Image (cartoon, helix red, strand yellow):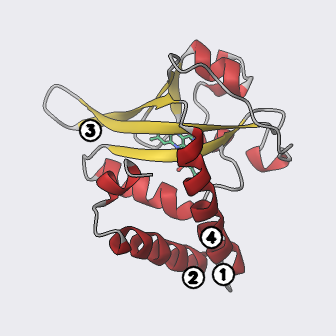
């Protein structure tokens, strides 16, 4: 099923404070492992997600600029923390605070990626949702996808720069 064939319902799913949603991917972001919490929240069977691109749970409200930053960091060998709105198979959504890291092989080369996600605080979401809506508006309001991504990427960097913090510190101030 193509992810863009699913219409968002606007209904939120929540998960427990002590639960962690885990997935692992190959170098191209295809899912190689998903834990039970992942499968429960997204409402897919394991066999339906293994080998599929991680964008299978992408929510249309998510700014492309956030995924651009995520991939830049990961490919550079760095970890990244990011708030992500994900979409379950029926279009419901669930917000996470993800910690994504490269996985290294015996000689230090990156062999895949790993994401652990916790439930975000409601007050953090109250700041992130309007920011993401602004980023998304830049993306959808542009002449084409390339210009939209460039404008959204610029806005994200400006918002972070205005705080005088690095992205990593910024994420933990919201
Ligand atoms: C380890 C790992 C975990 C990821 N987790 C998610 C996720 O939970 N939700 C999501 O939409 N994208 C996630 N991504 C990013 C996707 O690979 C993809 O870049 C994103 O969904 C945008 O897809 P698109 O550019 O095809 O629209 C993850 C990537 C990696 C490497």
Residue that mark 3 sits on: 110
Label 4 Cα crowd, 10 Å radius (few <14 / some 14-19 / many 20+): some
Residue 47 percent coordinates (x, y): 67, 18
Residue that mark 1 sits on: 144
Label 1 Cα crowd, 10 Å radius (few <14 / some 14-19 / many 20+): few
Residue 132 percent coordinates (x, y): 60, 61
Q: Quadrant of ligand 1?
A: top right
Q: Which mark is residue 133?
A: none
For the residues labelled 1 and 2, say whether their Cβ atoms are less than 8 Å apart: yes
Q: Is residue 80 left or right of residue 143?
A: left
Q: Secondary structure at mark 2?
A: helix
Instruction: Estimate the spatial distance between the alpha carbons at disc 1 and disc 2, rounded to whole Å.
Output: 6 Å
For the residues labelled 4 and 1, say whether their Cβ atoms are less than 8 Å apart: no
Q: Earlier in the sequence, mark 3 or mark 1?
A: 3
Instruction: Estimate the spatial distance between the alpha carbons at disc 4 and disc 3, rounded to whole Å.
Output: 33 Å
Residue 32 vs residue 128, the one in the foreground: 128
Q: Which mark is residue 134?
A: 4
Residue 126 vs residue 147, the one in the foreground: 126
Q: Earlier in the sequence, mark 4 or mark 3?
A: 3
Residue 163 vs residue 74, the one in the foreground: 163
Label 2 Cα crowd, 10 Å radius (few <14 / some 14-19 / many 20+): some
Instruction: Estimate the spatial distance between the alpha carbons at disc 3 and disc 2, rounded to whole Å.
Output: 31 Å
Q: Secondary structure at mark 4?
A: helix
Residue at point 75% right, 44% down?
A: 3
Splitting the image into 4 quarters, where does residue 154 fall? Answer: bottom left
Splitting the image into 4 quarters, where does residue 111 fall? Answer: top left
């Amino acid at each position: 099923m193509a992810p863009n064939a699913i219409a968002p319902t606007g209904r939120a799913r929540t998960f427990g404070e002590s639960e962690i949603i885990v997935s692992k991917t190959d170098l191209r972001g295809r899912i190689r492992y998903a834990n039970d919490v992942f499968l429960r929240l997204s409402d897919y069977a394991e066999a339906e997600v293994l080998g599929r691109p991680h964008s299978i749970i992408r929510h249309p409200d998510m700014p492309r600029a956030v995924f651009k930053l995520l991939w830049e960091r990961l490919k550079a060998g760095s970890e990244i923390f990011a708030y992500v709105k994900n979409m379950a198979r029926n279009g419901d959504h669930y917000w996470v605070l993800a910690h994504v890291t490269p996985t290294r092989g015996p000689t230090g080369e990156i062999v895949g990626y790993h994401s652990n996600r916790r439930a975000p605080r409601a007050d953090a979401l109250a700041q992130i949702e309007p920011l993401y809506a602004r980023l998304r508006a830049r993306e959808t309001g542009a002449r084409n996808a390339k210009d939209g991504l460039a404008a959204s990427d610029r806005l994200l960097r400006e918002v972070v720069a205005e705080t005088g913090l690095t992205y990593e510190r910024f994420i933990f101030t919201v």
